[in-house]
Image (spheres, rainbow, N blue to C red):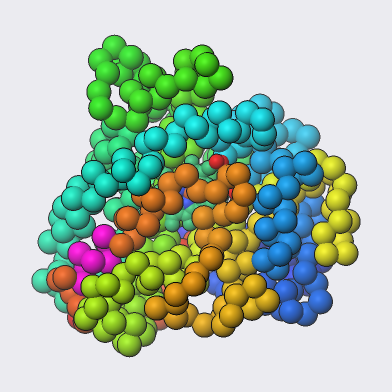
C-alpha cells in the first residue's frame, strides 16, 4: 500500500520501529526475544524517543499508573510531545480527573443491554455479505467480509450512511497507518472527518433522531451540554476505535481457522464453544497497542523512563507472556480462564468491548451456518496492517 519503507533496524532492543515491515509481519518473535532475553523495556530514538515494555506486569503497571503517564498522545507519530497541541478525542485522550466524566457520557450507548438490540441487525449485515460470495467457493475473508461488519454496524449506530464505508476506512488507514509518518495526510484526514461529522451535527440539532449523534447532543459532561468540539471528538473516536480493531479481530479469527481444521470443526459442531473461542481469538491475536506520554520520571523493570518520551503498550505481547498465563503461547479454543488484556487495562479499558465481542461472535456464527468447511488457499497472499492496530488485510479462503 501507499506507505514508504522504513529505514532498516540494526538492533530491536535499542532502535526498534513499530512501523517497520518486519514488525508488522511478525511482532511476536520480537516481543518474545525482548520479554525472555533480558530486555523487558526496549527503547528507540525514533519518533523523538519511545519505550517498549513487553512483559504483562510492566504493561499493566503503566496502564494503571496515571500519576506518571498521560494519555494525551495515544498514537506514536513524528510530532514531538511538546508540539502535540490541544487536539483531543475524549475519553481516550483524557486523564483523570476529567476522564471519568468524559467516559461516563459514552457508557450507556455501549452497555450490554444497549448492544443487544444490534444483534439481529448484525446478523442481517453478515448474511447480506455472505449472499455475495457464499456460492462462489472462495473469498477474501478480510476484504469481502470482516472489514464491512464493524463499518456497517457503527455507521448505523452513529446515524451516518453505511455506503460511506470506503471513506471511513480511508480515513482510518490515513490516520493509523500513513499519518504517523506523514502528518499532512493525518491533518487532512482529521479535517475531512470533522467536516463530515459537522454536517450531521447541524442536521441532528435541527431534527433529532434515535442515533449516537443525537445522543451526544442530549448528553452532559461536567453538568454542561457537550459542545461541538467534544461531540465531534467523540464521533471521531468511535469511528477510529471501532473499525480497524474489530475488522482485525474477525480477520485474524478466519486466518487462524483457515489453517486449523480441528478448531474449525469444533466451532462447526458445538454451538456452545463460541464464547470461549472469541476470548481466545481476542487474546491470541489482540490487535491493539496503545501509547502513553511519560509525565514524571519513573523506573520500570530497571529502566528509567524520562518525561516527554512516549511508551507503547503492546497488549498483544502481554497476552502471550508465559509468566502471567499458563501456556500463553498456545492457542486453546476452549481456554477456560482467560484474563486477557486485548481491551486494555486500567481506566481506559475499551468502552466498545461488548459491541466488539458481539460482532466477532455473530460474524463467526453466521459464517459457520453457511460455510462450515473452508481453508486458507495461499498463505503468501496474506499481509498485515502496520502500526498500532494490527490485523490481516487479505485472507484468501476456499470451500
Ligand atoms: C476487537 C475490537 C477492539 C479492541 C481489541 C479494542 C481495544 C481497545 C483498547 C486496548 C483500548 C484501551 C486504550 C488505552 O488504554 O489507551 C480501547 C479503548 C477504547 N475503545 Fe476499544 N477496542 C475494540 C473495539 C472497540 C469498538 C467497537 C468501540 C466502539 C465503537 C471501541 C471504543 C473504544 C473507546 C471509546 C475507548 C476509550 C475508552 C477510554 O478511554 O475510557 N473499541 N479499546
**Whole-percent x, y for residue 268 in the image:** 22, 78
Number of labelled discs?
A: 0
Picture quadrant where residue 139 is located: bottom left
In the image, the segment drawn in magenta is 362-368
Left or right for 109, reference 313:
left
Residue plotted at (77% across, 41% down)? 67
Nearest the viewer among 178 and 275 is 275
Q: Main secondary structure of the magenta part?
A: helix
Can residue 82 be seen? Answer: yes
Left or right for 154, reference 15:
left
Q: Quadrant of the C terminus?
A: bottom left
Picture quadrant where residue 326 is located: bottom right
Residue plotted at (25% across, 27% down)? 210
Left or right for 82, reference 222:
right
Q: Is residue 190 above or below residue 149?
A: above
Nearest the viewer among 394 and 307 is 307
Residue plotted at (34% across, 82% down)? 263
**Whole-percent x, y for residue 294 in the image:** 78, 45
Q: Is residue 391 above or below residue 348?
A: below
**Whole-percent x, y for residue 209 in the image:** 25, 23
Left or right for 212, reference 102:
left
Amino acid at each position: 500500500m501507499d506507505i514508504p519503507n522504513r529505514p532498516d533496524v540494526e538492533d530491536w532492543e535499542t532502535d526498534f520501529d513499530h512501523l517497520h515491515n518486519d514488525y508488522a509481519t511478525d511482532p511476536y518473535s520480537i516481543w518474545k526475544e525482548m520479554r525472555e532475553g533480558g530486555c523487558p523495556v526496549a527503547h528507540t530514538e525514533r519518533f523523538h524517543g519511545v519505550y517498549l515494555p513487553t512483559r504483562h506486569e510492566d504493561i499493566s503497571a503503566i496502564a494503571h499508573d496515571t500519576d506518571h503517564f498521560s494519555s494525551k498522545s495515544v498514537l506514536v507519530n513524528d510530532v514531538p510531545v511538546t508540539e502535540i497541541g490541544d487536539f483531543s478525542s475524549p475519553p481516550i485522550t483524557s486523564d483523570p480527573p476529567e476522564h471519568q466524566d468524559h467516559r461516563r457520557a459514552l457508557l450507556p450507548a455501549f452497555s450490554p443491554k444497549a448492544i443487544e438490540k444490534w444483534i439481529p441487525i448484525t446478523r442481517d449485515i453478515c448474511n447480506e455479505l455472505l449472499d455475495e460470495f457464499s456460492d462462489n467457493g472462495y473469498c477474501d475473508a478480510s476484504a469481502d467480509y470482516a472489514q464491512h461488519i464493524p463499518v456497517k454496524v457503527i455507521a448505523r449506530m452513529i446515524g451516518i450512511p453505511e455506503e460511506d464505508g470506503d471513506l471511513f476506512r480511508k480515513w482510518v488507514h490515513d490516520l493509523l497507518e500513513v499519518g504517523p509518518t506523514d502528518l499532512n495526510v493525518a491533518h487532512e484526514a482529521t479535517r475531512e472527518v470533522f467536516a463530515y461529522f459537522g454536517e450531521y451535527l447541524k442536521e441532528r440539532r435541527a431534527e433529532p433522531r434515535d442515533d449516537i449523534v443525537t445522543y451526544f447532543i442530549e448528553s452532559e459532561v461536567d453538568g454542561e451540554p457537550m459542545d461541538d468540539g467534544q461531540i465531534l471528538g467523540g464521533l471521531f473516536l468511535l469511528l477510529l476505535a471501532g473499525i480497524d480493531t474489530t475488522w482485525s479481530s474477525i480477520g485474524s479469527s478466519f486466518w487462524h481457522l483457515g489453517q486449523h481444521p480441528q478448531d474449525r470443526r469444533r466451532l462447526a459442531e458445538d454451538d456452545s464453544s463460541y464464547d470461549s473461542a472469541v476470548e481466545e481469538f481476542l487474546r491470541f491475536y489482540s490487535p491493539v497497542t496503545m501509547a502513553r506520554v511519560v509525565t514524571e520520571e519513573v523506573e520500570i523493570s530497571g529502566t528509567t523512563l524520562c518525561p516527554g518520551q512516549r511508551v507503547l503498550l503492546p497488549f498483544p505481547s502481554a497476552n502471550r507472556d508465559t509468566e502471567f498465563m499458563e501456556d500463553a503461547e498456545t492457542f486453546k479454543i476452549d481456554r477456560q480462564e482467560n484474563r486477557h488484556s486485548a481491551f486494555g487495562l486500567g481506566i481506559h479499558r475499551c468502552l466498545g468491548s461488548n459491541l466488539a465481542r458481539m460482532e466477532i461472535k455473530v460474524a463467526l456464527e453466521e459464517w459457520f451456518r453457511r460455510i462450515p468447511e473452508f481453508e486458507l488457499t495461499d498463505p503468501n497472499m496474506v499481509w498485515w496492517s502496520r502500526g498500532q492496530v494490527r490485523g490481516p488485510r487479505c485472507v484468501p479462503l476456499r470451500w
